[in-house]
Image (tube, grey):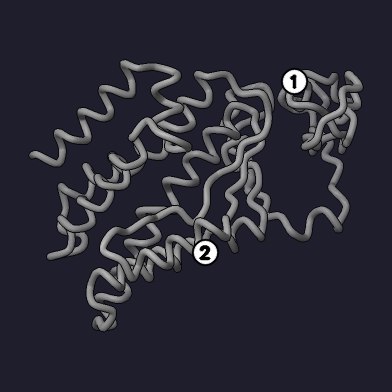
Amino acid sequence: MAKCEYCGKEVALPFRCKYCNGTFCVEHHLPEKHECQGLKRGSESESVRVYPEPASQRKNVIYIPSVTRIGQTKISTLLHSIEWDELTDLTIATLAIYIIYLGLFGWTVSPTLAMTLLVFSILTYVPHELAHKFIAQYYGLKARYKLFKEGLLITLLSSLLPIKVISPGSVLISGLPSRKILGVTALSGPLVNLLMALFISQTELFGALTDYFVQINLWIALFNLIPLGVLDGKKILEWSFETWLICFLFTILLFLI
């Protein structure tokens, strides 16, 4: 257990400030919350001192540049960091879903169809999970995608069964999120699938398979909106019944159009 250098509270997953290299709890992880000594405030001409992290901590992380300055809207937290093992987990999960799609088309497919189904696997799953991650980060929480062996096994086995299950992993969130934050974070995943379905339905991007791609996204959104167990729908419903009902009915309506 690490201790917050500002308040002394013990935390299991501390935040590391990239300006002073200190470790802090979720309440004090922002520079302005812990009186960061590595951040000079003042005129626009003043520079910001950045203390680089040790190479041992840096080698397994991809850092994506911030898109706003400190003190403005926390958009920079959306793309704070992506770990290599997280990318590996997402890749394995995507390949498992790809196997399901291949099974739906009889396993023996043309190279063109094989590539199209691979694109389907990426677009229907990865943006959904990254939406959860980025929204959680936007609210100052730690979030990472984690592959689950049991879920991966069930996903692979379902490729041989009539009923398909896509559940190789999920985004784990640490911190103290409110019910609203959990609900908004959960909503972001199905919402991405709905928006993608609406956008692609107005194009012929995938030719004869365009409608199929749209239907897959709608099914994923509808399934995740079911308010049971660990599905997104339960968190949304616990936050706002009206929001859940509107999204659920809207998804069903899109099926009927």
Q: Amino acid at mark 1?
A: Glu
In the image, 255 versus 195, the foreground residue is 255
Q: Quadrant of residue 40?
A: top right
User: Residue at 32% across / 59% down in the picture?
Assistant: 164
User: Residue at 75% across / 20% down in the picture?
Assistant: 27
Residue 212 on image: x %, y %: 18, 58
Residue 153 on image: x %, y %: 49, 64
Vertical position of residue 197 compared to residue 136: above or below: below
Q: Which residue is mark 2?
A: 91
| Numbered label tally | 2
In the image, 214 versus 159, the foreground residue is 159
Q: Secondary structure at mark 2?
A: helix
Residue, far left: 257
Q: Residues within 10 Å of mark 1 (few under 14, many from 20)?
A: some
In the image, 226 versus 173, the foreground residue is 226
Q: Which residue is mark 1?
A: 27
